[in-house]
Amino acid sequence: MAQSSPRRASALAWFGPVIALLVIVMIYPTIQLFRVSLSQTEFFDPVAFVGLENFRYVLSDPDFWAEARITAEFVAGSLSLALVFGVLTAVILQSLGGKAAAIFRTILLLPWTLSMTVVGCLWLWLLNPSYGPVRYLLSLAGYDTGLLLGDPDLAIWLIVGASAWWSFPYAMVLVTAALQSIPKELYEAVEIDGGSALAKFRFVTWPHIIPTLGSTALVLCIMYVTLVSLIVVMTGGGPLGETTTFSLAIYKETLNSIDIAPAAVISIIVLIANLVLGIGYSVLSARIKRSK
Amino acid sequence: MLTRRRIGASAVLSMALLAMTGAVQAQDIELTYSTFLDPANDTDPRVAAQAEMLAKFEELHPGVKVKILVDPTAANLARGLKSGSGEPDIGRVTSYSLPELVLTGNVAELDGRIAADGIENDDWLLPLETAKFNGHFYGMPQDFRIPLLMYRAGLLEKAGVAAPTTWDEVCATGSKLTGDNLIGYAVPLGNSGGLGGAQALGEYVLSTMLAPDGKYFAEDGREIAFSRETFVRAAQTIKELYKTCGTTPETSLQFGYSEVHDGLRAGTVAMATFGLARFRALVAQGAGDDLHWAPAPSYSADDKQTVFGFRVVLNANSAHPDEAWELIKFATGPEGQAILAKGGEVVARKSAYDAPYFKDPAAQRQKDWAKLVVERGQVVSYSVILTKFHEIVGEALQRMVLRDGSPEDAYDEVISSYERELARVK
């Protein structure tokens, strides 16, 4: 049945500001982004329509594919470490229980509370190849650390370590919440059946935390894909461009280039990747809700 | 009832109100000045000098107030110009980043104003003509900066060596200094701690190495003007410092401004070619009297050195261009420059050096640097995509060192990448 006019007006009055806000901060910039990607620009101003030329330029640029590889390495590496450490610490602290677990949990949460710039500066100092503690400690063990962040083959993995260190507490907190919602009776049932600790994890813990892990992974993925400041501080994208992810490339291109259209093209690719991840997150969240 | 006294009082009140309105209207003119000097920083003498200069300007121009926009990397100024905004009205930018900003079309050309005000060409450490870009003035020189060799005298004394004057001497001297946790001579090829790789190298070393004849980029800031031979020689020198001299360990590959600064301060870098503006800070932050300076090394002991400096630019979209120009004229004029000199800058105006401040022995260092600018300074043209150029050349040189590439390959990489980037500039 059609809504009456007063109801329609009331709905418009309630939703109007939100819709206007969405148009201003999301729809318009997105349209502008597509417009820029199809143009040649002088700084922020599109000066000529060039069709799909910018897409051809970007996709034929070897740097783009190198950035794609580095982004994949960075996201996959950070995600794997953050999830593994998040689950491990959550399970260990859960089994520890009591005040000690609460204290450790609070301490372990600290990295997550730090700004990315602070995290970057901290790791830059730790990994300094001249006077950094990492180099010093490893040299005591007779190991030559080499250039660390200056090594093109190693730099991205060191950044992966730093980003995982920063983000694993997020996974730990969410997994802890999932663990606390598991009924104790299930563990008792496994015990009665003579199941080991591994069996408890395999048949009780894991099925209960997997949906949470999925949604955590998606959120972290989106964060890693868009992360810039940590890399800017630690390497600036070097050495030899081996730590330049998509987001860093967009940031640098927008700041340093006169024609920012290629950066707009990469932004669209990142946007699509994030959209896919966002849809995945929504679907997964809905599934978790239904299962509860 | 209207009495004579009431009429008189009303007239006086009206005149007072009118005068107040007038004053308010006059004070309505507010200029925004983009500068990296933060008024909240009370430890930097340049801040105090800047405040004194601006106060004097406001005293001379009662209707104008200056609002400072703290802009450490001039990013706000760049954004304002790129987007065609009228703010900030004026700003300080380095001479090497000026061409990139001129390309926005929003930096005002000053030729007419300079001619109309009869500003002399010769009352500057280097002639005013050298401040032109592509045949026009887009900014007035505020100071000059010449690269210096900064070194920890104690470390050189301990090694029994003197400060080098040529690259051959750097090679020989640095190898005697380099050891565990000590870099003999730092060559900053990295881009850590910021964007636009190898910016420190470009600013202090390459702009001189690649332009012994003053030819760095074409006058319009597009085509590369240095020769293949010059580049290959420079790249070869850098490679030797890293690979065969034993002067520069590979840890220096990721160095930028901050790392060189920290190294000189802490004494983990014995020598580096660095900007004179950092000397005072390094001394204050721990290097103390052990930090000495000498003219920067070059291929011959008396080669020209590429000088850069800050230019004060006028936003073409400023709502108050005449008042903004008055401020620029004052800040770069003899009186304003004499005040700014108290902050320790090597001010650009020659006649400012006649000010009483320069009779003080504390100003001797500034006078020595000013003399160095006059005697060995040269001005070059910079690229309109200089940030990109630095990124390209930094990566090519890093590759040469890390992958043992040849200087010739580094040159080919620089040329092809630069041309590709330049093609994107309309």
Image (cartoon, coloured by chain):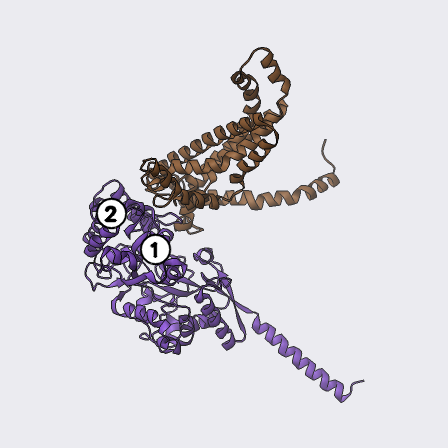
Image location of residue A253, percent across then percent down: 40, 46
Image location of residue B49, percent across then percent down: 45, 69
Q: Residue at x 44, y 38 (%)?
A: A162
Is residue A279 shown to the viewer in this render? no
Say which residue label 2 marks.
B242
Amino acid type assigned to the residue bearing label 2 in the image: Tyr
Query: Splitting the image into 4 quarters, where does residue A50 fall?
Result: top left
Tag 2 near tag 1, CB within 8 Å: no
User: Are there few (<14), some (14-19), or many (20+) residues within 10 Å of tag 1?
Assistant: many
Amino acid type assigned to the residue bearing label 1 in the image: Leu
- Chain B: its colour in the image is purple
Image location of residue B281, percent across then percent down: 40, 61
**Disc 1 sits on a residue from what chain?**
B
- Chain A: its colour in the image is brown
Q: Secondary structure at mark 1?
A: helix
Q: Secondary structure at mark 2?
A: helix
Q: Nearer the viewer, residue B154 or A64?
A: B154
Q: Residue at x 44, y 46 (%)?
A: A121
Query: Splitting the image into 4 quarters, where does residue B384 fall?
Result: bottom left
Side of B43 relative to B251 (left or right): right
Q: Quadrant of the N terminus of chain B?
A: bottom right
Say which residue label 1 marks.
B264
